[in-house]
Amino acid sequence: MTDKQPDQDYQYLPRLSRRESLKWMGILAASAALPGLAACSDNTAVAATQAGHWPELSLAPVTAKGYGKDPNLIIPPETPWPRTLTPAQLTTVAVLSDILVPKDGNVPSASQVNVPDVVDEWVSAPYASQQRDRITILSALAWIDDEAELRFQKPFTKLSSAQQTAIIDDIAYENAKTPEQFQRIATAFSRFRSLVLAAFFCSPEGTKDIGYLGNVAIAGDYPGPTEEAKQHLDKMLQELGLSDYAYQEQRA
């Protein structure tokens, strides 16, 4: 296999407007039922170990108030918080995102659909969940760069594809075989991977890739849900103990 050499001048430049990135962040925050985002939102603790290295970051808290529960995104909103990732961090996010979601045929890569902008918006938001993710993800980015320097004496984004893959293979998943020195970063990287995947599959290209049609115009009278859909709904209502409250006619 021919190893792809790094583009020494590559730098990811933000392309998504604040309005669009905020809309994406809102979709992500409202999509906690998605498996990928659930792993992001539950904020599993990143346990400390004595093995290996770990960056002890001192981050100034994001103190903006945020939008509240019902932001108006129809009118171009003012942005009460700045995006906080540096150009170098944003480029590392782009490289890592494309390792996780590379271009495949006609399906674009994660960076091509602007996932790094959404990650930046997410970790820069002042809400508690995002702020917990901020320390986890920024620590992961710092650990990956430190590991690249220790192994290959270069920043991660300057490594060859084979060198980058060698690091990511060691931290990609945490299981019983994960060496102790990689367990903490593996947990943090799992959070990062979940956010990247959730952002990608919330993009128009990502939803198209999984066959999600969204709202589709139907000519003529609405035929109603299919029998399969109604059976699924009945099963869910029964499991939730809500069957007695379903299908009641609205009283005047």
Image (cartoon, helix red, strand yellow):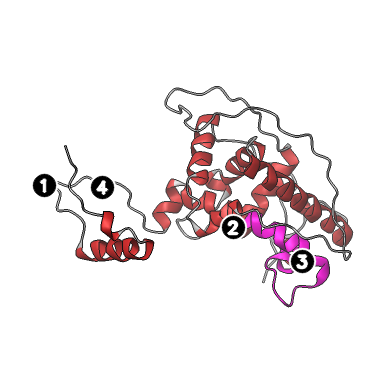
On the image, the x and y values in percent for residue 155 come to 81, 51
Which callout, 3 or 2, points at the residue further toward the start of the chain? 2
Q: Quadrant of the C terminus?
A: top left
Q: Which comes before the other along the chain, label 4 or label 1?
A: 4
Classify mark 1: helix, strand or loop: loop
Q: In what element is the residue under mark 4?
A: loop
- Percent coordinates x, y for residue 119 in the rendering: 62, 44
Foreground of the two, 125 or 45: 45
Judged left or right of residue 244, residue 114 is: right
Q: Are marks 3 and 2 in contact (CB under 8 Å)?
A: no
Q: Is residue 81 above or below residue 235?
A: above
Residue beneath the point at 53% across and 35% down: 22
Q: Residue at x 33, y 49 (%)?
A: 214
Q: Which residues are magenta?
A: 167-193
Residue at screen point 53% across, 40% down: 25
Q: Quadrant of residue 175?
A: bottom right
* Residue 47 among those drawn in magenta: no
How far apart are labels 3 and 1 at the CA level?
A: 56 Å
Q: Which residue is labeled 2 in the image?
A: 39
Quick check: 221 left or right of 65? Answer: left
The answer to whether mark 3 and mark 1 are in CB contact below 8 A is no
Residue labelled with disc 4: 216
Q: CA distance from mark 3 to mark 2?
A: 17 Å
The residue tagged 3 is 183
Name the residue at the bottom extreme: 177
Q: Please, what is the three-letter code of the amino acid marked with disc 4?
A: Val
Q: As shown in the figure, which amino acid type bears the numbered disc 3?
A: Gln
